[in-house]
Amino acid sequence: MTTPGGYKVEPIGQFEWKITGPDGKSTRIWGDPHVDEGDGGKWDFKKNSTFVLGDGTRINVTTAPWGNNGMTVTQGLEIISGNDRVTVSGIDKGKGVIGQITQDGYAHSNSFRGDVFVMGRETDDWSHQGREIIGSNNGGDSFKLGNQLPVGNPYPWRDETNPVEMIRNFDSDMYRNWNQNWRPNRFGCNPYYEDKNSQNDFRADRYDCNRHQNQLRRAFRAFAELFRVFERLTNLNDRMYAMRNRTMYA
């Protein structure tokens, strides 16, 4: 399961699941439950808890008793991103069963209670009550906290401070760094606009990036025209509003 921000949440095995971020770093949760951060940090939790990812996705973790020493293990996950919601059940019995995505995330977003752990700017850093978790006490009954930990940035592109460089990179990514030998699927054809049943020149032997680029250019021109229409409608609305006000006060 991959979130809109590029975080991958995957059940690994009994009692075990993992979060891998777009930064390439990860956090592993296993056992009763231990949290192993990719940078070497280790701590435990015991009660039902929520992990908040850098893009705002919430992972609600339900725990279940295990053994006779008061410990718990992960029983299931509820992953909520916007109105999308999916559950993973039975992690205490095996790898877990991933359910279907449902459109009721908002209805469940405030119904879960427990400790809350918020991701920092890296996928292997976590905070509780705004301070970095550096350990735990008595198997996760409470937490050892360090300094304040800034939360993750759900919009990393906003860190671009040079708009000219950002546009140049966009242009390079979209139009220049194309590979003629790229095979977007096992047939080697372009799935976006080539159709062997239409009048398009269906080329199953290789990917035609020139045609793909031209199609993208036409699509962006259509978007530009759409925004120009929106601008004209907005101007028309402003003029009508001004005329209505003059009529009222005449």
Image (cartoon, rainbow, N blue to C red):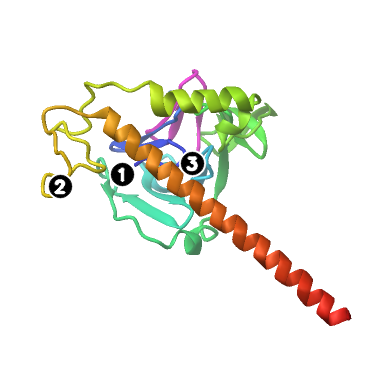
Residue located beneath label 3 in the image:
46
Badge 1: residue crowd in 10 Å (few <14, some 14–19, many ≥20): many
Q: Position of residue 38 (x, y in %)?
A: 46, 21
Magenta range is 25-47
Relative to residue 151, is residue 97 drawn left or right?
left
Rendered-image quadrant of the C terminus: bottom right
Badge 2: residue crowd in 10 Å (few <14, some 14–19, many ≥20): few
Residue 104 vertical position relative to residue 99 in the rendered view, above or below: below
Residue 28 among those drawn in magenta: yes
Q: Earlier in the sequence, mark 1 or mark 2?
A: 1
Residue 55 vertical position relative to residue 132 in the rendered view, above or below: below
Rendered-image quadrant of the N terminus: top left
Mark 3 and mark 2: Cα distance apart in space: 62 Å
Q: Nearer the viewer, mark 1 or mark 2?
A: 2
Amino acid at the residue labelled 3: Lys
Relative to residue 32, is residue 239 drawn left or right?
right
Relative to residue 214, is residue 26 drawn left or right?
right
**Whether residue 5 is visible:** yes
Amino acid at the residue labelled 2: Gln
Which residue is rendered at x = 45% and y = 23% of the image? 172
Q: Earlier in the sequence, mark 3 or mark 1?
A: 3
Q: Nearer the viewer, residue 167 or 239?
A: 239
Which residue is rendered at x = 43% and y = 63% of the image? 104
**SS at mark 1 in the image:** loop
Amino acid at the residue labelled 1: Ile
